[in-house]
Image (spheres, rainbow, N blue to C red):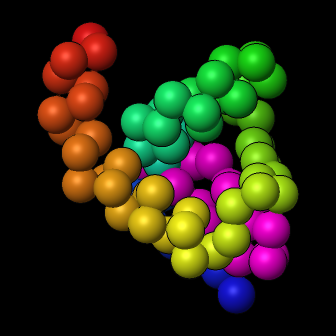
Amino acid sequence: MAATTATATNKQVKLTSNDGVEFEVDIKVAECSKTLKTMLDDLGVEENEDVNIPLPNVNGETLAKVIEWCNHHKVRIRSKIF
């Protein structure tokens, strides 16, 4: 089961929950979560790399809510960060 919540023109990251649900989201959306931003920074993600982040402590339902929150707040958060 997979869910896509981002456009093809932006860099994507794949987030995989502990129950195998995969979400492909814009990397800027994922970075709205401090935890995911730290993980991406720690991995040293390059612009042309495919990124798959397993989240063994998060189930698909919870991850869907986190992504929904990030999508809803991405404009407000990005304007404060940058």
Q: Residue 20 location in percent, x, y?
A: 80, 76
Q: Is residue 19 above or below residue 30?
A: below
Please tell me which residue is depicted at 56% across the width and 77% down the height of the picture: 61
Residue 4 within the segment the image draws in magenta: no
Asked whether 67 or 27 is in front, the reply is 67
On the image, the x and y values in percent for residue 58 come to 69, 61
Which contiguous range is marked in magenta? 9-25
Tell me if residue 10 can be seen.
Answer: no
Q: Residue at x 57, y 28 (%)?
A: 37
Q: Is residue 82 left or right of residue 33?
A: left
User: How many marks on residues?
Assistant: 0
Quarter occupied by residue 3: bottom right
Residue at x 16% of width, y 34% of height = 76
Q: Is residue 22 magenta?
A: yes
Q: Position of residue 52 (x, y in %)?
A: 78, 50
Residue at 60% over, 33% down: 35
Residue 73 lies left or right of residue 20; in this view the side is: left
Q: Is residue 13 left or right of residue 75?
A: right
Quadrant containing the N terminus is bottom right
Q: Give above or below for 31 relative to 44.
A: below
Residues 80 and 2: in front is 80
In the image, is 35 to the left or to the right of 66? right
In the image, residue 61 above or below residue 7: below
Q: Is residue 24 visible?
A: yes
Which x, y percent locates residue 10?
A: 45, 44
